[in-house]
Image (tube, rainbow, N blue to C red):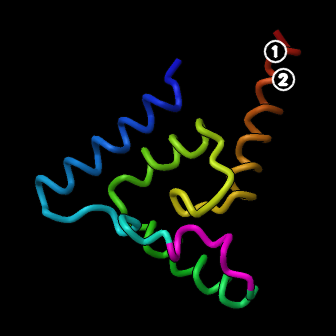
Amino acid sequence: MVTSEQLYERLNNGIRFLLQENGVGPACAGRGDIFFLENLFEPASRDAAETYAKELCKDCPLLRACGEYALAANETEGIWAGMNPSERRAIIQKGQRSARSGSLSS
């Protein structure tokens, strides 16, 4: 089983690789202002920032690693792999329900 720490390290390795190979990191690097929306109090501002952040995530080469880390670490804030906290919670809950129903049928 892979731990959230190992996934975080994998994500960081991916970021370092992109920086070394291309001189460019993921779109989110240094952009906490749009990827961590909890400080935006106006719903319209929050919605616009979330939409923009998700758009930037779409083409990121680290999308999968980012999502794996965010789900494993149960990140409760920010946009990770184009998902907001409630979208990540839904995936985690669905996985838990599937695991429970799988163990019941065994």
Give 80 or 37, whichever is nearer the viewer: 37
Please identify the residue farthest to the right as the structure is shown.
Answer: 104
Numbered circle sitting on residue 100: 2
* Residue 35 coordinates in the image, percent (x, y): 53, 69
Q: Between residues 103 and 96, which one lies in front from this camera angle?
A: 96
* Location of residue 66 in the rendering, given as x and y in whole percent from the top left corner: 46, 49
Q: Secondary structure at mark 2?
A: helix
Circle 1: element type = helix
Numbered range of the magenta stretch: 33-41
Residue type at mark 1? Ser
Determine which of the numbered discs, if any, sits on residue 103 in the image.
1
Number of residues whose C-alpha sits closer than 10 Å to that of mark 1, classed few (under 14), some (14–19) or many (20 or more): few
Q: Position of residue 103 (x, y in %)?
A: 81, 15
> Looking at the image, which residue sits at the far front?
39
Residue at (28%, 41%) from the top-left corner?
A: 13
Mark 1 vs mark 2, CA separation in Å: 5 Å
Rendering quarter of residue 87: bottom right
Q: Residue at x 61, y 86 (%)?
A: 48
Q: Position of residue 6 (x, y in %)?
A: 43, 28
Left or right for 27, reference 43:
left
In the rendered structure, which amino acid carries the disc numbered 2? Arg
Query: Which of the 4 image quarters holds residue 18?
Result: bottom left
Residue under the image location 52 percent in, 32 percent down:
4
- Labels 1 & 2 near each other (Cβ < 8 A): yes
Asked if the magenta segment contains residue 34, the reply would be yes
- Is residue 48 toward the left or the right of residue 10 in the image? right
Q: Reply above or below: 87 against 12.
A: below
Is 58 situated left or right of 23 in this image? right
